[in-house]
Each structure stands twice: as C-alpha cells, then as structure tokens.
Image: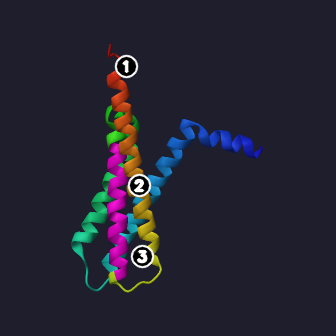
Amino acid sequence: MSFMNYRRNFRSPLMRDRLRKVWHYLAAFAIIFEGIDELDQAGRNWSFILLCWIAAAVIIAVTILHSRVKMYASFLETLIYLLEGIVCGSIGFLAIEEGKTGLPYVWFVAAILCLSATGIQLFRSRSQHRASRTVGAP
C-alpha cells in the first residue's frame, strides 16, 4: 500500500473517529494508572485519586456510548477533552510537587493539547449550531 492510500484513509471520518476513540482510551488508562501510582505514595492524596478514577470512568463510559447518543455527541466530546485537560494539568502539578523534573512538562503539554481541543470543539459546535439555525431562515 502506498503512502497516498494511508493518507487518504487518515482523512476518512471513520478513521478519525477510530483514532479519537483510541486517544480517549489511552488517556483514560494513563489517568487510571496515575491514580494507582498515587496509592503507592506515602502521603496519599485521596481527592486526586478520586478525580483520576471518576474522570477515567466518565471518559471510558462516554467513549463507549458515544455512537448511541448522537444528539449530544458534540457536547460529550467537549466534556471528554475538558476532563482530560483538567486531569493532565493536575497530574503535572502533582509531579512538580513530588519533585520530578521532566515529567510535568509532558503532562502540561498534554493538558494544553486537550484544552485546545476543547476550544476547537466548542468553536465547531457553535458554528454548526449557527449554520443549522440559518438554514431555514428567509
């Protein structure tokens, strides 16, 4: 298969949807493992552990049920990106507090990417909402 076929497949909505689901599952499992890692620490931060596990459960549940709730798909996608951004930023601050040097920046970059995806998703949903309102206008 040539490079052009891969590129064409990447542009298809089905492939983008699959990649989005994989991203959400990977993020959820990383968040779950970060909560488990916090359990091993001497000074357990239970609010952080609960934040990780609840956010991961919501991300997995919404990703699984995403195709069944088409009406709220845009809102749920925005919610997932927002949750991922908040948790990634929290993990970055916790890593700084633990004295880690390079790892917090990775989590902060992930948080920035997730929050920018939230902004993009909000912009797209607003423009789609405006377009749907003006379709029937005289």
Secondary structure of the residue carrying tag 1 is loop
Residue bearing the label numbered 3: 104
Q: Nearer the viewer, residue 104 or 128?
A: 128
Sequence-wise, the earlier of marks 1 and 3 is 3
Residues tagged 2 and 3 counted as in contact (Cβ below 8 A) = no
Tally of numbered tags: 3
Q: Which residue is mark 2?
A: 116
Is 10 within the magenta?
Answer: no
Residue where numbered disc 1 is placed: 135
For the C terminus, give its image quadrant: top left
Assess disc 1: are there few (<14), some (14-19) or many (≥20) residues with their C-alpha within 10 Å of its C-alpha: few
The boundaries of the magenta stretch are 76-96
| Relative depth, front residue between 43 and 111 | 111
Numbered disc 2: secondary structure: helix
The amino acid marked with disc number 1 is: Val
Q: Is residue 101 above or below residue 73?
A: below
Q: At which x and y percent is residue 85? A: 36, 60
- x then y, percent, for residue 47: 22, 70
For marks 1 and 3, give the CA distance.
Answer: 46 Å
Q: Mark 2 and mark 3: span between their CA atoms?
A: 18 Å
Tell me the kind of residue under disc 2.
Ser
Q: Is residue 116 left or right of residue 43?
A: right
Majority SS type along the magenta span: helix
Eye-nearest disc, 2 or 3: 2
